[in-house]
Every structure is written in C-alpha cells, then in structure tokens.
C-alpha cells in the first residue's frame, strides 16, 4: 500500500508540473534552467525545515518566502544573496545542534555497554 501511495503522489506531482508548464509556456519564455533558482530556494526551505518532516519543510519554505520578501524590500537586486547567505548560519546552527545530540547518543551507548 505505501508503494502505491508513493507512486500515486509522484504521478499527481508530475501531472501538476506538466499542466503548470503548459499554462506558463505561452506567457513567458522558458529555458532549460528556468526552475533552477526556484529549486534552490526549495532546497533552502527543506534545509531550514531540517529534512525531517513535511510540515517542518513547509514552515521552512514559508520562512524562505518571507525572508525573500523582506530582503527584496530592502534591496531587490540582492534578495537571492540574502536568502542563500542565510543558509550558512542555519547550516552551522544545525551542525552544532546535531553534533551535541550525536555526542549524547554515543555517551549513552557507551554507558549501556558498560552496565
């Protein structure tokens, strides 16, 4: 059943992408890398969400959108720089947070091994 659900979700996502491409094609000029920047921003949203759950990723994507809106208010030509520049401190913060939990996990395993 989960494989059927995954295949159905993939099918629906592909169909929505195809319809979106057909609808936007006549309005704008499309190139081979038209969605590259959008994909990178989606990746930043997924990283902010922690790559753990869909709701956290959705919150991360909303945060990226809000941050990009505020950044474009201050300087519209540098909005991508602000968004991708925010990725560095977020990755450092998540690395520090994860490192602490990994060290605690190792200490727990060592303690259980000795008992």
Image (tube, rainbow, N blue to C red):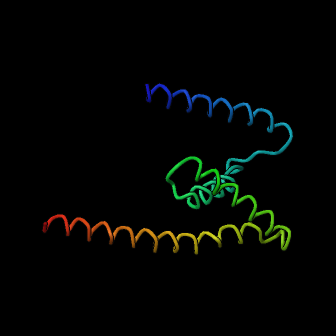
Image x and y of residue 77, in percent:
82, 70
* Residue found at the very far left of the displayed protein: 114
* Residue located at (64% from left, 71% from top): 86
The image quadrant where one finds the C terminus is: bottom left
- Describe residue 21's horizontal placement relative to residue 51 as left or right: right
Q: Which sits in the foreground, 88 or 59?
A: 59
Residue 7 position, x and y percent, is 50, 28
Q: Identify which residue, 33 or 86, lies in the foreground.
A: 86
For the point 82% across and 67% down, which residue is it?
A: 72
- As displayed, is residue 43 above or below residue 96? above
Up the image or down, 3 lies above or below 56; here it is above
Relative to 23, say whether 46 is above or below. Answer: below
Q: State the residue at coordinates (84%, 44%).
A: 28
Report whether 73 appears left or right of 67: right
Q: How many marks?
A: 0
Q: Residue 34 at x, y = what percent?
A: 72, 50
9 to the left or right of 68: left
Give the x, y percent position of residue 35.
69, 49
């Amino acid at each position: 059943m989960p494989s059927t659900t995954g295949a159905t979700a993939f099918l629906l996502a592909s169909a929505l992408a195809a319809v979106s491409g057909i609808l936007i094609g006549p309005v704008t000029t499309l190139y081979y890398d038209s969605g590259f920047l959008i994909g990178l921003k989606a990746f930043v949203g997924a990283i902010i969400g922690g790559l753990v759950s869909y709701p956290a990723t959705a919150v991360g994507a909303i945060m990226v959108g809000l941050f990009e809106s505020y950044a474009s208010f201050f300087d519209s030509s540098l909005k991508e720089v602000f968004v991708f520049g925010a990725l560095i401190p977020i990755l450092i913060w998540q690395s520090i947070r994860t490192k602490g939990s990994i060290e605690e996990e190792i200490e727990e395993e060592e303690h259980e091994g000795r008992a």
